[in-house]
Amino acid sequence: MPGVLPASGREAYTPARGRLIVTNGYCEGGCAERVSPRQRSVDAVRQQQPSMAAPQAPAVRVLTS
């Protein structure tokens, strides 16, 4: 399988390059997207909040003769 050429330096590792590597399947693992500490805390709070159940339609009565 073709791979990715090594970058010439740190500045060559851009978000766009990373996206292409992951999208094309060249990443062999450990490619979890980095999340800022602020976003991580927002996500944690969101997971702790109870979700509201979807309203359900009332039961339909079937008349038998």
Image (tube, rainbow, N blue to C red):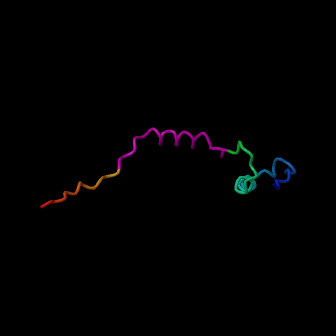
Residue 7 picture location, percent across and down: 85, 51
Q: Quadrant of residue 19?
A: bottom right
**Mark count:** 0
Q: Quadrant of residue 48?
A: top left
Residue closest to the eye, 1 or 13: 1
In reply to whether residue 54 is colored magenta, the answer given is no
- In this image, 44 relative to 56: left or right? right
Magenta stretch bounds:
32-53
Residue 38 picture location, percent across and down: 57, 41
Residue 14 picture location, percent across and down: 75, 52
Please give the name of the residue rendered at 70% of the width and 45% of the height, measured from the top-left corner: 31
Residue closest to the eye, 55 or 60: 60
Residue closest to the eye, 53 or 39: 53
Q: Quadrant of residue 61?
A: bottom left
- In this image, 54 relative to 62: left or right? right
- In this image, 2 relative to 57: left or right? right
